[in-house]
Amino acid sequence: MAQKICLIPGDGIGPEVAHSAREVISASGAAIEWVELPAGASALETHGAVLPEETIQAIEFHKVALKGPVTTPIGKGFTSVNVGLRKRLNLYAAVRPVRNLPGIQSRYENVDLVVVRENTEGLYSGIENEIVPGVVQSLKIATRLGCERIARYAFQYARLRGRHRVTVFHKANIMKKSDGLFLECARQVHAAEGAGIDYDELIIDNGCMQLVRDPSRFDVVLMENLYGDIVSDLCAGLVGGLGVVPGANIGDTCAVFEAVHGSAPDIAGKNLANPLALIMSGVMMLNHIGETECADRIKTAYNTLLAEKNPDCLTPDIGGRGGTTQFTQA
Ligand code: NAI
């Protein structure tokens, strides 16, 4: 019987890459019935809300979604749909595997790391106010529950995937309480549940320097929300850019799979977007629902396509002169 999966096309390049991923996943033979749902700036026009209740309820009901990026206005306007979705569905773990791919040029070799980002707390709590004109504050929230569960997730992920080391990036020298709690929880979880997995800690500024010097020394990298957001894009840059790095937002009951990249308004509607990051997120989704053969089929297809290096079939961000549709068809 076909499994129902929610599909959120989103904004900007979202519909282009979402429909590409849908086409590729369907071609793999996966028994999926898609339930297309609105979210983002486009949903405000059509449904009167950026995150309509029907979208939340459908994901809660069907448990799994594949999501295109959505636009968030800068410095004004509505609050982030992504933050809202992650909080409402308690998708506390963002998982972003970063690897070299065949045929894609980058400055580095042997990159195979996973960013595990706490996805519901930190400065993304969205608690901001103006105390007096000209003085504003943003609150960074860390709870023992939130810090422990993401640390537990990271060690469990490492154990299940045969990974050997968890490194925490932090700034507990400055944010002694919030990042201090994050570290304390990671240490406790490592001591209690991390047998056989190495553990270390780096102050994040040094961590970023080490990442761009030699990313191959990293395995699972665990951090709080804002650091994870920034470091994910940095890591995408290590292996060829935002067009090639997938992601998952995982909770105890639901999971939403989406690329690291945003809605890329600069290239939207021009058939220039690389759909691979969302296709790879779709592969993560297929593995999550047990459709592993279809996942492997898609992986073989894109690895072969990338290795062939036919510029007519690749998007410009990875050195091609083709577009979203050419990549999808190939
Ligand atoms: P962005 O990730 O959309 O774009 C950054 C750069 O990478 C741009 O030059 C863009 O053309 C390029 N790029 C991104 N994805 C690409 C792809 N698949 N193929 C080829 N090139 C690609 O980041 P930006 O410009 O900072 O944000 C644009 C909007 O996206 C903002 O409203 C932001 O809030 C939103 N955003 C949404 C996310 C989500 O829905 N998960 C994640 C990140 C940003």
Image: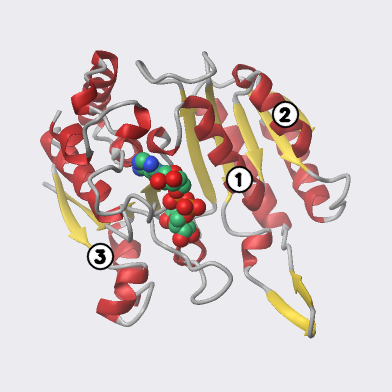
Q: Residue 16, can we see it?
A: yes
Q: Is residue 278 above or below residue 122?
A: above
Question: Which mark, residue 37?
Answer: 3
Judging by the rendered image, the residue that carries numbered circle 2 is 209
Asked whether mark 1 and ligand 1 are closer than 8 Å, the reply comes as: no
Q: Kindly report the distance in space between the C-alpha atoms of the residues bearing marks 2 and 1.
A: 13 Å
Secondary structure of the residue carrying tag 2 is: helix
Please tell me which residue lies in front, 242 or 317: 317
Question: Which mark, residue 216?
Answer: none
* Residue appearing at x 19%, y 26% in the figure: 312
In the visual, does 250 lie left or right of 10? right
Task: Please state the horizontal and vertical placement of residue 227, each as a whole percent of the image.
Answer: 66, 46
Report crowding for label 3: few under 14, some 14 to 19, many 20 or more residues within 10 A (C-alpha): many
Type of colouring: secondary structure
**Which amino acid does the dot numbered 2 rest on?**
Met
Judging by the rendered image, the residue that carries numbered circle 1 is 230
Please tell me which residue lies in front, 259 or 293: 259
Q: Kindly report the distance in space between the C-alpha atoms of the residues bearing marks 3 and 2.
A: 40 Å
Secondary structure of the residue carrying tag 1 is: helix
Pointer 3 or 2: first along the chain: 3
